[in-house]
Amino acid sequence: MAGQPEKLACLRVAPLRLRLETRGPFRTPEYKGAVFRGGFGKFFRELVCTTGKPTCAGCPEASGCRYSLVFETPVIPEKFTVLRKYSHAPHPFVLTPPLDGRTALPAGAELDVELTLIGPGVDYLPYFIGVFEMLGESGRFGGPFRVREAVSALDGRELVYEGESRRWLGPPPLWRPGSAPQPVRRLRLEFLTPLRIRTGGRYNASPDFVAITHALLRRIHLLAAVYGGGDGDAGWLRPLLKQADAVVTERASFALYRWSRTSGRQKRTVPMDGVVGWLEAAGELTELAPYLRAGEWLQVGSGTSLGMGKYRASMSAN
Protein backbone atom coordinates (compact mmCIF):
# COMPACT_ATOMS: atom_id res chain seq x y z
CA MET A 1 0.00 0.00 0.00
CA ALA A 2 2.86 2.36 0.72
CA GLY A 3 3.87 2.43 -2.92
CA GLN A 4 0.47 3.51 -4.24
CA PRO A 5 1.23 7.27 -4.33
CA GLU A 6 3.76 6.42 -7.04
CA LYS A 7 0.81 6.63 -9.44
CA LEU A 8 0.65 10.30 -8.47
CA ALA A 9 4.41 10.80 -8.32
CA CYS A 10 4.76 9.77 -11.98
CA LEU A 11 2.18 12.35 -13.03
CA ARG A 12 3.35 15.93 -13.46
CA VAL A 13 0.75 18.36 -12.13
CA ALA A 14 1.34 22.13 -12.27
CA PRO A 15 -1.43 24.26 -10.68
CA LEU A 16 -1.34 27.89 -11.82
CA ARG A 17 -3.38 31.02 -11.24
CA LEU A 18 -3.76 33.43 -14.14
CA ARG A 19 -4.47 36.98 -13.01
CA LEU A 20 -6.47 38.85 -15.62
CA GLU A 21 -7.47 42.51 -15.84
CA THR A 22 -10.49 43.66 -17.82
CA ARG A 23 -9.82 46.39 -20.39
CA GLY A 24 -13.42 47.34 -20.97
CA PRO A 25 -16.92 46.33 -19.83
CA PHE A 26 -17.01 42.60 -19.12
CA ARG A 27 -20.27 40.63 -18.97
CA THR A 28 -20.54 36.99 -18.04
CA PRO A 29 -22.98 34.42 -16.62
CA GLU A 30 -22.75 33.67 -12.91
CA TYR A 31 -20.88 30.44 -13.68
CA LYS A 32 -18.08 31.45 -16.01
CA GLY A 33 -16.84 28.02 -17.07
CA ALA A 34 -17.96 28.32 -20.69
CA VAL A 35 -16.78 31.93 -21.09
CA PHE A 36 -13.06 31.20 -21.05
CA ARG A 37 -13.36 27.68 -22.46
CA GLY A 38 -15.61 28.84 -25.30
CA GLY A 39 -12.96 30.05 -27.71
CA PHE A 40 -10.06 28.21 -26.17
CA GLY A 41 -9.93 25.33 -28.61
CA LYS A 42 -10.46 27.64 -31.60
CA PHE A 43 -7.56 29.94 -30.70
CA PHE A 44 -5.32 27.07 -29.64
CA ARG A 45 -5.81 25.46 -33.03
CA GLU A 46 -5.09 28.75 -34.82
CA LEU A 47 -1.92 29.16 -32.78
CA VAL A 48 -0.39 25.73 -33.41
CA CYS A 49 -1.91 24.32 -36.63
CA THR A 50 0.70 23.97 -39.38
CA THR A 51 -1.47 22.55 -42.16
CA GLY A 52 -4.42 24.94 -42.29
CA LYS A 53 -6.79 22.00 -42.86
CA PRO A 54 -10.42 22.78 -41.92
CA THR A 55 -10.68 19.70 -39.67
CA CYS A 56 -8.25 17.44 -37.86
CA ALA A 57 -9.80 14.25 -39.23
CA GLY A 58 -7.24 12.47 -41.39
CA CYS A 59 -4.54 15.07 -40.80
CA PRO A 60 -1.07 13.52 -41.29
CA GLU A 61 0.35 15.76 -38.54
CA ALA A 62 -2.24 14.76 -35.91
CA SER A 63 0.02 12.37 -33.98
CA GLY A 64 2.52 15.12 -33.17
CA CYS A 65 0.15 18.09 -33.12
CA ARG A 66 -0.15 20.01 -29.85
CA TYR A 67 -3.78 20.83 -30.54
CA SER A 68 -4.61 17.17 -31.14
CA LEU A 69 -2.88 16.13 -27.92
CA VAL A 70 -4.58 18.79 -25.81
CA PHE A 71 -8.11 18.77 -27.26
CA GLU A 72 -8.66 15.67 -29.38
CA THR A 73 -6.21 13.12 -27.99
CA PRO A 74 -6.91 10.04 -30.11
CA VAL A 75 -7.50 6.69 -28.46
CA ILE A 76 -4.95 4.23 -29.81
CA PRO A 77 -6.18 0.80 -28.61
CA GLU A 78 -2.81 -0.93 -28.85
CA LYS A 79 -1.15 1.89 -26.89
CA PHE A 80 -3.81 2.78 -24.33
CA THR A 81 -5.84 -0.35 -23.65
CA VAL A 82 -7.31 1.41 -20.61
CA LEU A 83 -9.21 3.73 -22.99
CA ARG A 84 -10.95 1.10 -25.10
CA LYS A 85 -14.38 2.25 -23.89
CA TYR A 86 -13.68 5.94 -24.52
CA SER A 87 -13.75 8.04 -27.70
CA HIS A 88 -11.02 10.41 -26.46
CA ALA A 89 -8.49 10.59 -23.68
CA PRO A 90 -8.97 13.01 -20.76
CA HIS A 91 -7.62 16.50 -21.41
CA PRO A 92 -4.15 17.26 -19.98
CA PHE A 93 -5.46 20.41 -18.32
CA VAL A 94 -8.12 21.70 -15.95
CA LEU A 95 -9.50 25.21 -16.45
CA THR A 96 -11.39 26.66 -13.48
CA PRO A 97 -13.08 30.04 -13.96
CA PRO A 98 -13.36 32.82 -11.36
CA LEU A 99 -15.70 31.55 -8.66
CA ASP A 100 -17.27 34.85 -7.65
CA GLY A 101 -20.82 35.61 -8.73
CA ARG A 102 -20.10 38.88 -10.53
CA THR A 103 -21.83 39.16 -13.91
CA ALA A 104 -20.95 42.73 -14.95
CA LEU A 105 -17.48 44.15 -14.41
CA PRO A 106 -16.00 47.52 -15.37
CA ALA A 107 -12.63 48.11 -16.98
CA GLY A 108 -9.77 47.54 -14.54
CA ALA A 109 -11.45 44.70 -12.62
CA GLU A 110 -9.38 41.68 -11.64
CA LEU A 111 -10.27 38.06 -12.43
CA ASP A 112 -8.41 34.94 -11.32
CA VAL A 113 -8.52 31.80 -13.47
CA GLU A 114 -6.99 28.56 -12.24
CA LEU A 115 -5.17 26.50 -14.85
CA THR A 116 -3.83 23.10 -13.84
CA LEU A 117 -1.57 21.48 -16.42
CA ILE A 118 -1.10 17.71 -16.44
CA GLY A 119 1.70 15.61 -17.95
CA PRO A 120 2.78 17.02 -21.34
CA GLY A 121 0.37 19.91 -20.82
CA VAL A 122 3.02 21.39 -18.49
CA ASP A 123 5.37 21.78 -21.46
CA TYR A 124 2.72 23.67 -23.41
CA LEU A 125 2.23 26.46 -20.87
CA PRO A 126 3.47 29.17 -23.30
CA TYR A 127 0.72 28.14 -25.73
CA PHE A 128 -1.93 28.31 -23.01
CA ILE A 129 -0.79 31.81 -22.07
CA GLY A 130 -0.73 32.80 -25.75
CA VAL A 131 -4.30 31.57 -26.18
CA PHE A 132 -5.48 33.56 -23.16
CA GLU A 133 -3.88 36.66 -24.63
CA MET A 134 -5.70 36.01 -27.92
CA LEU A 135 -9.00 35.52 -26.06
CA GLY A 136 -8.52 38.82 -24.25
CA GLU A 137 -7.54 40.74 -27.37
CA SER A 138 -10.56 39.42 -29.28
CA GLY A 139 -12.99 40.79 -26.66
CA ARG A 140 -15.57 38.24 -27.82
CA PHE A 141 -15.63 36.13 -24.67
CA GLY A 142 -17.10 38.32 -21.97
CA GLY A 143 -15.10 41.36 -23.03
CA PRO A 144 -11.52 42.53 -23.53
CA PHE A 145 -8.89 41.65 -20.94
CA ARG A 146 -5.16 41.19 -20.56
CA VAL A 147 -3.03 38.62 -18.74
CA ARG A 148 -1.30 40.48 -15.92
CA GLU A 149 0.66 37.50 -14.61
CA ALA A 150 0.72 33.77 -13.97
CA VAL A 151 1.66 32.57 -10.50
CA SER A 152 1.86 29.15 -8.90
CA ALA A 153 -1.46 28.26 -7.32
CA LEU A 154 0.40 26.16 -4.76
CA ASP A 155 1.40 29.24 -2.77
CA GLY A 156 -0.23 32.02 -4.79
CA ARG A 157 3.03 33.98 -4.85
CA GLU A 158 5.73 32.41 -7.03
CA LEU A 159 5.70 34.35 -10.30
CA VAL A 160 5.98 32.28 -13.48
CA TYR A 161 5.01 34.81 -16.16
CA GLU A 162 4.85 38.60 -16.18
CA GLY A 163 2.29 39.81 -18.71
CA GLU A 164 3.30 43.45 -19.17
CA SER A 165 6.78 42.55 -20.43
CA ARG A 166 5.78 39.05 -21.61
CA ARG A 167 8.66 37.70 -19.58
CA TRP A 168 9.04 34.11 -18.34
CA LEU A 169 10.62 33.71 -14.91
CA GLY A 170 10.91 29.94 -14.81
CA PRO A 171 9.01 26.68 -15.17
CA PRO A 172 5.85 26.24 -13.12
CA PRO A 173 6.31 24.48 -9.75
CA LEU A 174 4.88 20.98 -9.63
CA TRP A 175 2.48 19.65 -7.03
CA ARG A 176 4.02 16.74 -5.14
CA PRO A 177 2.02 13.96 -3.49
CA GLY A 178 2.78 13.19 0.10
CA SER A 179 1.68 10.68 2.66
CA ALA A 180 -0.84 11.82 5.23
CA PRO A 181 1.10 13.25 8.20
CA GLN A 182 -1.25 11.47 10.60
CA PRO A 183 -4.07 8.95 10.45
CA VAL A 184 -7.11 10.36 8.66
CA ARG A 185 -10.48 9.25 9.96
CA ARG A 186 -12.79 12.12 9.03
CA LEU A 187 -13.27 14.12 5.86
CA ARG A 188 -15.34 17.01 4.57
CA LEU A 189 -15.62 17.71 0.85
CA GLU A 190 -17.06 21.05 -0.23
CA PHE A 191 -17.80 21.37 -3.95
CA LEU A 192 -17.05 24.85 -5.24
CA THR A 193 -18.21 24.18 -8.80
CA PRO A 194 -20.92 21.83 -10.13
CA LEU A 195 -20.17 18.11 -9.86
CA ARG A 196 -21.42 15.93 -12.71
CA ILE A 197 -20.79 12.21 -12.33
CA ARG A 198 -22.53 9.06 -13.48
CA THR A 199 -23.35 6.18 -11.18
CA GLY A 200 -24.76 3.04 -12.75
CA GLY A 201 -24.99 4.84 -16.09
CA ARG A 202 -27.13 7.71 -14.77
CA TYR A 203 -26.21 11.18 -13.56
CA ASN A 204 -26.05 11.19 -9.78
CA ALA A 205 -27.98 13.99 -8.08
CA SER A 206 -27.16 12.78 -4.54
CA PRO A 207 -23.56 11.53 -4.65
CA ASP A 208 -22.02 9.92 -1.60
CA PHE A 209 -18.36 9.45 -0.69
CA VAL A 210 -18.14 6.11 -2.47
CA ALA A 211 -19.49 7.42 -5.79
CA ILE A 212 -17.25 10.49 -5.75
CA THR A 213 -14.10 8.62 -4.75
CA HIS A 214 -14.63 5.86 -7.30
CA ALA A 215 -14.96 8.53 -10.01
CA LEU A 216 -11.84 10.33 -8.77
CA LEU A 217 -9.68 7.19 -8.56
CA ARG A 218 -10.70 6.12 -12.04
CA ARG A 219 -9.87 9.58 -13.38
CA ILE A 220 -6.42 9.41 -11.78
CA HIS A 221 -5.99 5.93 -13.23
CA LEU A 222 -6.71 7.20 -16.76
CA LEU A 223 -4.48 10.26 -16.37
CA ALA A 224 -1.58 8.18 -15.04
CA ALA A 225 -1.94 5.63 -17.85
CA VAL A 226 -2.07 8.21 -20.65
CA TYR A 227 0.16 11.03 -19.35
CA GLY A 228 2.22 9.46 -16.59
CA GLY A 229 3.83 6.58 -18.43
CA GLY A 230 1.59 4.02 -16.75
CA ASP A 231 0.82 0.63 -18.26
CA GLY A 232 -2.90 0.74 -17.58
CA ASP A 233 -2.77 -2.09 -15.05
CA ALA A 234 -5.55 -1.52 -12.51
CA GLY A 235 -4.06 -3.73 -9.81
CA TRP A 236 -3.14 -0.72 -7.65
CA LEU A 237 -6.69 0.61 -7.95
CA ARG A 238 -8.71 -2.29 -6.56
CA PRO A 239 -7.55 -2.11 -2.91
CA LEU A 240 -8.29 1.62 -2.83
CA LEU A 241 -11.77 1.15 -4.27
CA LYS A 242 -12.39 -1.45 -1.58
CA GLN A 243 -11.21 0.98 1.11
CA ALA A 244 -13.50 3.65 -0.25
CA ASP A 245 -16.45 1.24 -0.11
CA ALA A 246 -15.96 0.93 3.66
CA VAL A 247 -16.11 4.70 4.31
CA VAL A 248 -19.48 5.96 5.58
CA THR A 249 -21.09 9.19 4.40
CA GLU A 250 -22.45 10.65 7.62
CA ARG A 251 -24.04 13.84 6.32
CA ALA A 252 -24.49 15.43 2.90
CA SER A 253 -26.29 18.35 1.32
CA PHE A 254 -26.40 18.81 -2.46
CA ALA A 255 -28.54 21.00 -4.68
CA LEU A 256 -29.01 20.91 -8.44
CA TYR A 257 -27.13 23.59 -10.38
CA ARG A 258 -28.54 24.10 -13.85
CA TRP A 259 -26.47 25.57 -16.64
CA SER A 260 -25.63 24.87 -20.26
CA ARG A 261 -22.99 25.80 -22.81
CA THR A 262 -22.98 26.32 -26.54
CA SER A 263 -20.75 23.86 -28.36
CA GLY A 264 -19.14 25.36 -31.46
CA ARG A 265 -18.06 21.93 -32.63
CA GLN A 266 -21.46 20.30 -32.11
CA LYS A 267 -23.42 23.44 -33.14
CA ARG A 268 -25.91 23.04 -30.32
CA THR A 269 -26.62 23.91 -26.70
CA VAL A 270 -25.32 21.23 -24.35
CA PRO A 271 -26.88 20.80 -20.86
CA MET A 272 -24.19 20.69 -18.17
CA ASP A 273 -26.31 20.43 -15.00
CA GLY A 274 -24.47 19.28 -11.90
CA VAL A 275 -24.77 19.48 -8.14
CA VAL A 276 -23.09 21.76 -5.63
CA GLY A 277 -22.86 21.18 -1.89
CA TRP A 278 -20.88 19.21 0.65
CA LEU A 279 -20.55 15.92 2.44
CA GLU A 280 -18.89 14.60 5.58
CA ALA A 281 -17.54 11.06 5.80
CA ALA A 282 -15.84 8.86 8.39
CA GLY A 283 -13.73 5.74 8.17
CA GLU A 284 -10.20 4.62 7.35
CA LEU A 285 -9.06 7.38 5.00
CA THR A 286 -5.29 7.50 5.51
CA GLU A 287 -4.34 5.64 2.31
CA LEU A 288 -6.93 7.54 0.31
CA ALA A 289 -5.81 10.96 1.55
CA PRO A 290 -3.06 11.65 -1.08
CA TYR A 291 -5.51 10.91 -3.90
CA LEU A 292 -8.17 13.11 -2.38
CA ARG A 293 -5.57 15.89 -2.12
CA ALA A 294 -4.63 15.36 -5.77
CA GLY A 295 -8.30 15.69 -6.66
CA GLU A 296 -8.32 19.24 -5.35
CA TRP A 297 -6.22 20.10 -8.44
CA LEU A 298 -7.30 17.40 -10.90
CA GLN A 299 -11.02 17.75 -10.05
CA VAL A 300 -13.56 15.02 -10.66
CA GLY A 301 -16.41 14.04 -12.98
CA SER A 302 -17.38 15.45 -16.36
CA GLY A 303 -16.50 18.92 -17.59
CA THR A 304 -13.22 19.44 -15.73
CA SER A 305 -11.93 21.53 -18.66
CA LEU A 306 -14.88 23.82 -17.90
CA GLY A 307 -13.94 23.95 -14.22
CA MET A 308 -16.54 21.45 -13.02
CA GLY A 309 -15.94 19.11 -10.09
CA LYS A 310 -13.68 21.41 -8.06
CA TYR A 311 -13.73 20.74 -4.33
CA ARG A 312 -11.99 21.70 -1.13
CA ALA A 313 -11.06 18.86 1.27
CA SER A 314 -10.71 19.12 5.06
CA MET A 315 -9.25 16.10 6.85
CA SER A 316 -8.71 15.20 10.49
CA ALA A 317 -7.82 12.27 12.73
CA ASN A 318 -11.06 12.42 14.71
Image: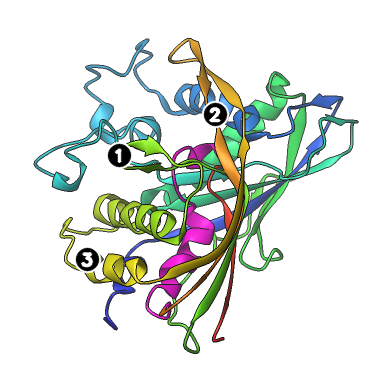
Q: Amino acid at mark 2?
A: Phe
Foreground tag (3 vs 2): 3
Q: What is the quadrant of the N terminus in the image?
A: bottom left
Q: Is residue 244 rendered magenta in the image?
A: no
Residue at screen point 68% across, 35% down: 31
Q: Which mark is on residue 238?
A: 3
Which residue is labeled 1 in the image? 89
Residue at mark 2: 40
Is the residue 265 above or below the residue 32 in the image? Answer: above
Q: Which residue is found at the position 18% from the left and 55% from the top?
A: 232
Q: Residue at x 48, y 21 (%)?
A: 46
Mark 3 or 2, nearer chain start: 2
Could you give the CA–CA distance between mark 3 and mark 1, rounded to whole angstroms? Answer: 21 Å
Foreground of the two, 112 or 215:
215
**With respect to residue 102, does 15 lie above or below?**
below
Image coords of residue 272 (percent x, y): 53, 29
| Closest to the observer, 201 or 100 | 201
Q: Residues within 10 Å of mark 2 (few under 14, many from 20)?
A: some
Quarter residue 259 falls in: top right
